[in-house]
Image (tube, rainbow, N blue to C red):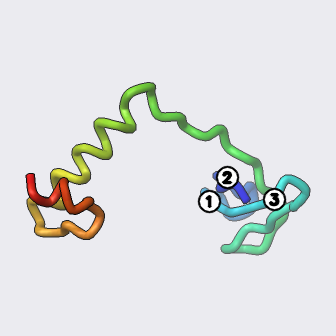
Amino acid sequence: MPLYSFHCAKCDSDVELLVGSEQRPACPNCRSKKLQRLVSRVAAPGKSRDLIKAARSQAAREGHFSNYSRSERRG
C-alpha cells in the first residue's frame, strides 16, 4: 500500500496514512472522513544519491556501521 499525505478539513491536521486505492481513510485524530489528499513532494533527480551518501557519512561519524557492507567498513 502506498503512503499518502492528507489534510483533515474538520480538525485542520495533516497526516500520512498507508491506504489502498479503494479505501476511504478516516482522520486518526478526529475520525472524520473529510480528508483531502495532498500532492506529494518529489526528490529532484540526483538528490537521493547525495542524501544517502550524507546519511551514511553521518552514521559513520557516529559509529553506526551496521548498514555498510564488509568492504565499505574497511575503507
Between the residue at mark 3 and the residue at mark 1, the CA separation in whole angstroms equals: 13 Å
Residue at 73% across, 67% down = 27
In three-dimensional space, the C-alpha distance between marks 3 and 2, rounded to whole angstroms, equals: 10 Å
In the rendered image, the residue lying farthest to the front is 71
Residue 39 drawn at (x, y percent): 65, 38
Q: Secondary structure at mark 3?
A: loop
Residue type, mark 3 in image: Gly
Q: Find numbered disc 1 in the image and state the secondary structure of the residue it sits on.
A: strand
For the residue pair 74 and 49, the one nearer the viewer reads as 74
Q: In the image, which is nearer the foreground, mark 3 or mark 1?
A: 3
The secondary structure type at the circle numbered 2 is: strand
Side of 66 relative to 61 (left or right): right
At 53% from the left edge and 34% from the top edge, which residue is drawn?
42
Instruction: In this rendered view, identify the residue nearer to me: 26 or 57.
Output: 57
Which mark, by number, is residue 4?
2
Answer with mark 3 or mark 2, whichever residue precedes in sequence. Answer: 2
Residue that label 1 marks: 16
Rate crowding at label 1 as few (under 14), some (14 to 19) or many (20 or more) other CA atoms within 10 Å.
Answer: some
For the residue pair 32 and 5, the one nearer the viewer reads as: 5
For residue 20, which numbered disc appears in the image? 3
- Residue type indicated by callout 1: Glu
In the rendered image, residue 37, in percent from the top left (x then y), is placed at 73, 47
The outermost residue toward the top is 45
Q: Residue at left 73%, top 59%?
A: 1
Q: Earlier in the sequence, mark 1 or mark 2?
A: 2
Q: Say how many tags the image has.
A: 3
